[in-house]
Amino acid sequence: MSRTLESANREISRVRDLPYGLARTQAAERQVRLVDAEGPDDARAYALSTLVEAYVWGGEVDKAYVPFTRLVRWWDERPDLFDEQDRHTLFWSFKWMVANLTEFPTVPAAQIDRTLVDMEHRFAVAGNGMNAVALQRFVWSRARGAQDTAAAYEAWVATPRDDFSQCEACEPGDRASYLFEVGRTEEGVRLLERTLTENPTCATEPADMLSHLQLAYLEQGRLADAAATHRRGLAHLADSHGDMAGARGRHVELLARGGHGDRAVRMIEADQRLLTGGDSPDSRLTYLVHVGAALAVLRATEPGRPVRLTTVPATTVAELADWARAEADALAAAFDRRNGTAHVSGTVARAWETTAAPEPLDLAVIPAQVRQVGREAASGDAPAGVPVDGAPGGVAGPDGGATRGAGGVAPDIDEVLGRASRLVDDGDPAAAAPLYLEAARHAEDAGLLADAGAALAEAARCAQVLDDHEGASWAYARATTLLRAGGADPLLTAAVVRTHARSAADLGRADAALAEVERCLDELAGTDGAPETPADVPGAVELVERRRAEVDRERAELDDCAARLLATLGRDGEAAARASAAARAFGVAGHVADASHAFWLAGRLHADAGATDAAVEDLESAVEGFGLVRDRDLRAQVAALLIDVLRRAGREREADDVTRMLTD
């Protein structure tokens, strides 16, 4: 039976509510098939444009041209079936198509030229403004390194904005990246600084513009600004869509040039999928260029530094540099053949000539001198007059000075903690960390060891979210010692140990973190981690039951953490079993969301091991759980993995059922 327009639009709208990825793309493909088979024709434009968008932002831009061509043809045949939203989406999609075609060297230059001409003609006939057309002419000229690129840029900037202009958050970053490329650094910096005061946001911003700005600051010698912008950019990457290959590569470059080879290598390892793939060949090449700049710096000083990669045949920085250069050269040659210039090859060659900054960047959230003094104090070797966990005369503040109250009088600890908490709430953990350190020092001076440990754990968290894993790991370890020495609730100590695990794993210390997790489990065994409550205390039974539930949940959390550490150590079989146990424990306790996360982990591990049946069972449980707690985004992400596992196993009908479930 044919669907009504209302029913079709409702189902397509549900697709648009899904996060970008395989699940959304396959759901969009299904809606196009349904419209083709059953109608109604009035929904065809909406279905096709939804599929175009899913491909563009879901990492399959090369597939978007076919439904886009169908959408244009449908406009030519039945413009009366396009409402205002359909019409706007059609013309907006022209920008994606021209830009995306340039990113595939197999697309002939003549096809791009024809698409540009068609875009300009259609915009003129429709009475649209020409800003978007001018932008795409600039994009195509810049990609080739054509002689008219500068003129094309000025023409775009001079063309009045209109309804089809680049979004206001993206345009400044696009302009600045070109200005930086041609040496107009001051102009680009001023543009981005002015834009960032307006807090722009979109699918890729402000993460992308911040990644450009950090390198511009580095070129200008504004090292503190470069460090602060790097931290801010990393924080925004997690909220961005698409592979963000350029932004990620620029962060790697900054780390290497700024004297942080360990962090640069860790980031390459974490994003190694981008070495061999990306949203497009151009996206991959952009990443390789910035990683190449980083590797050129690292190879000059530490060519033998090990790299842990599974996607690339390289075990050292030098080997990775050689491999990446060969890959980048091959891609550049393909683009240059299409473009008829040597522009891209020149860009690659210049990247491999990159050198380090004159001095290293200070990216520490917890300063090295604070960590050193803390170690000496903990071992009994602290110099006279140096407080535990502090620098001489007080913990170093953001400017390197002491943070004692006026006249050397210790400020109220609660007041310091309150200021730190407000800074975290305002999105400034870098400024909050010294205050937490100050509170920890004063608490320890007063003999409040558990309070000192809790404050130090907060400082560690600030460092962790800003990628200072060395500082975070030191602070977490010291916090754990203080909490135990101060007789803190084992539940608090366990929570700190779990949070520490991420930094420990990033630093290659997963074994030590796993041992701490197991110790916490032992500490929670037997007495439920707390003294027995006398039966004659009012509400004693309820208190005991509540405590037992809290301990049971923490044990499940620790098992889940252990599973993730075991996976990091390559012990996937043990990890999957531990994750499944955690999922069941969460489920019994009624913590559905936590159970779903644990089932998701177990499903991923089983899928990687080729255990399809176990993977499907765990992933189905995760999909069901996220559905129960109404988390559509995570439900769709897990469903995407489940669909992929089923299709790889040849279970197409089951995969189709999962896809249908997402929109029905």
Image (spheres, helix red, strand yellow):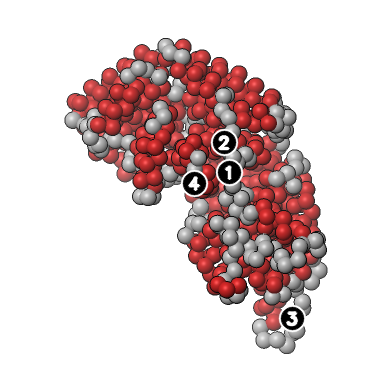
Neighbor class of circle 2 (other Cα within 10 Å; few <14, some 14-19, many 20+) is: some
**Left-right relation of 346 to 198:** right
Q: CA distance from mark 3 to mark 1?
A: 54 Å
Q: CA distance from mark 4 to mark 3?
A: 55 Å
Describe the element under mark 3 as helix, strand or loop: loop
Query: Which amino acid does the dot numbered 2 rest on?
Result: Ala
Mark toward the start of the polypeptide (2 vs 3): 2
Question: Which tag is nearer the camera, tag 2 or tag 3?
Answer: 2
Q: Which residue is mark 1?
A: 361
Identify which amino acid the numbered label 1 is placed on: Leu
- Asked which quadrant contains residue 488, the reply is bottom right
Question: Mark 2 highlights which residue?
Answer: 357
Callout 2–callout 1 Cβ contact below 8 Å:
yes
* Position above or below: 577 against 157: below
Tag in front: 4 or 3: 4
Residue type at tag 3: Thr
Disc 2, SS? loop
In screen coordinates, is 39 left or right of 438? left
Q: Residue at x 65, y 37 (%)?
A: 261
- The dot on residue 225 is 4
What residue sits 57% from the left and 24% below the top? 352
Q: CA distance from mark 2 to mark 3?
A: 61 Å
Quarter holding the N terminus?
top left
Real-space Cα distance between discs 2 and 4? 14 Å
> Which labelled disc corresponds to residue 533?
3
